[in-house]
Amino acid sequence: MTGEEVGKQLGWSVSKVSRIEKARAAVPWSDVSDLLDVYGVDDATRAALIQLCKDSKQQAWWQPYNDVLASFKNLANYIDLESAASSLRIYTPLTIPGLLQTEGYARAIIATARPLELTAEEIERRVELRLHRQTVIAKDPPLRLWAIIDEAALHRRVGGDKVMREQLAHLAAVARVPDITLQVIPYGAGGHVAMAGAFSIFSFADDPDVLSVEAVTGTLYLDRDADIRRAALCFDHLRTTAHTAVNSVELINEVARNYT
């Protein structure tokens, strides 16, 4: 089977399959189990390989959060890509990107998204996972993050004034981190090429780029060259439409003064 065929059956990117084959990623036993299902491995070999994987102590850092990820398989794929990527270009129109969220903002977003389904404990587990994801910014070498957000995300009162003051102050601070570029598309820019919604482009040292696109039914993962080129061109247009990094911080601070 080709990596593309395996990835299609598991809902993984070809890049993920490639990184596993090249021993560039820890392989948790749950992923090994999924691969063995696709490969039709016999029970004895299956048991031996899964036990070997468990004994090797190789596990992705997010494995302890399997209780959180059980109903969000696409999120596990996203975190895997996020952790392995050397750079990430991301556009979000309505919310602050997860990698740049404060604890209060993350809690408010998660609690609002599924208010009738999550217990207080489940909300806290999701907040903990989201904050843990942010360690990729400080890994060695650090993730090079280029985030473009719409001004609408700055004005949307998520969690109340105090939460938003803290969130915008955090944004202004992280915008000065060397490996982070943050731009804001102002209302005055009018319509632009990414009105359809959020997307992320993951780039790796030796593997093909992967595009993720937010959809009503979940996140879609694409790695066709044509899709990557189109998304990269779209991101380049957004870069020129948005304020410069310096002017973006000025706009963030200006909006922050509205939260009294």
Image (tube, rainbow, N blue to C red):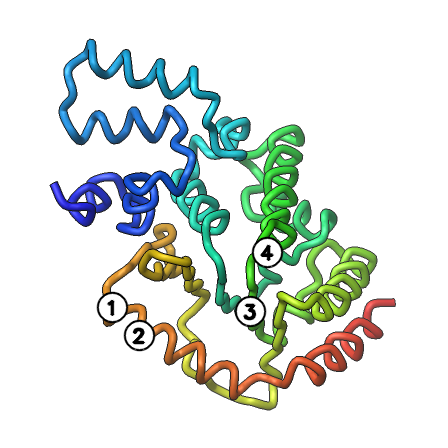
* Residue at the image position 79 percent from the left and 79 percent from the top: 254
Number of other residues with Cα within 10 Å of mark 4, as a class: few under 14, some 14 to 19, many 20 or more = some
Q: Which residue is mark 3?
A: 146
Task: Give the alpha-carbon distance from disc 1 to disc 2, as whole Å.
Answer: 6 Å
Q: Is residue 166 above or below residue 73?
A: below
How far separated are the C-alphas under marks 4 and 1? 26 Å
> Hey, which quadrant is residue 159 in on the image?
bottom right
Tell me if 148 is positioned left or right of 162 in this view: left
* Comparing labels 4 and 1, the label whose residue is closer to the camera: 4
> Which of label 4 and label 3 is nearer to you?
4
> First in sequence: mark 3 or mark 1?
3
Residue 252 vertical placement versus 114 (above, below): below
Query: Is label 2 in a helix, a strand or a loop?
Result: helix
The residue carrying mark 4 is 142
What's the residue type where badge 4 is placed? Pro
Inspect the image, locate mark 1, and give the three-letter code of the amino acid beneath it: Asp
CA distance separating discs 3 and 1:
21 Å
- Name which residue lies at 35% across and 61% down: 209
Of tags 2 and 4, the one toward the viewer is: 4
In the rendered image, which residue does mark 1 sit on?
225
Mark found first going from the N terminus, 3 or 2: 3
Residue 227 placed where, x, y %? 27, 69
Residue corresponding to mark 2: 229
The answer to whether the residue labelled 1 contacts the one labelled 2, judged by CB atoms less than 8 Å apart, is yes
- Of 113 and 31, nearer the camera is 31
